[in-house]
C-alpha cells in the first residue's frame, strides 16, 4: 500500500477503535440504568438493519454519481471542441 493509503487506513482504524470504546461506555451506562427492563432489541438484528440502510444510501449515492457523470459526458459530447491554431 502507498503511504497515503496506509495513513488513511490507520486513521480509520483509530476512529473505529474510539467509536467502539464510546459505544461500550454508552452501553454500560444504558444497561445499568435499564436493569429492570427485560426486552431489549436483538443487537445482531439492529446491526444488520443499520448496514442494510447504509448500503441502500450508498447504492443511491452511486446511482446519483453515475447520473451526474452521464450528464457531464453528454454535455461534453455536445460541446464543439475548440480549435487551437
Image (cartoon, rainbow, N blue to C red):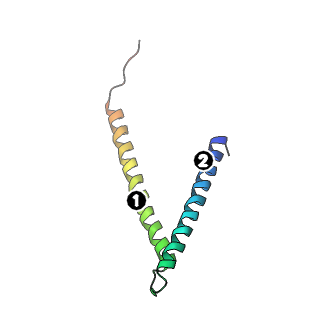
Residue at point 65%, 47% (across, down): 6
- Where is mark 2, residue-wise? 8
- Judged from the image, the secondary structure of the residue bearing numbered disc 2 is helix
Question: From the viewer's perspective, is the residue at label 2 or at label 1 nearer?
Answer: 2
Image quadrant where residue 28 sits: bottom right
Q: Is residue 14 above or below residue 39?
A: above
**Left or right: 5 with respect to 54?**
right
Give the mark nearest the N terminus, 2 or 1: 2
The answer to which of 26 and 82 lies nearer the viewer is 26
Residue at point 46%, 82% (across, down): 40
Label 2 and label 1: CA atoms lie apart by: 22 Å
Residue 24 lies, in percent from the top left, at 56, 69
Residue at point 57%, 55% (across, down): 15
Residue 82 lies, in percent from the top left, at 36, 20
Rendered image: mark on residue 18: none
- Judged from the image, the secondary structure of the residue bearing numbered disc 1 is helix
- Where is mark 1, residue-wise? 57
Q: Is residue 61 above or below residue 72?
A: below
Please identify the residue farthest to the top as the structure is shown.
85
Q: Is residue 81 above or below residue 37?
A: above
Quadrant for the C terminus in the image: top left
Crowding at mark 1 (Cα within 10 Å: few <14, some 14-19, many 20+): few
Amino acid at each position: 500500500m502507498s503511504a497515503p493509503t496506509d495513513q488513511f487506513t490507520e486513521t480509520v482504524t483509530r476512529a473505529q477503535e474510539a467509536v467502539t470504546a464510546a459505544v461500550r461506555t454508552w452501553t454500560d451506562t444504558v444497561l445499568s440504568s435499564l436493569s429492570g427492563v427485560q426486552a431489549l432489541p436483538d443487537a445482531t438484528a439492529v446491526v444488520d438493519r443499520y448496514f442494510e440502510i447504509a448500503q441502500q444510501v450508498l447504492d443511491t449515492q452511486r446511482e446519483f454519481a453515475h447520473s451526474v457523470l452521464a450528464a457531464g459526458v453528454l454535455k461534453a459530447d455536445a460541446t464543439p471542441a475548440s480549435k487551437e491554431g
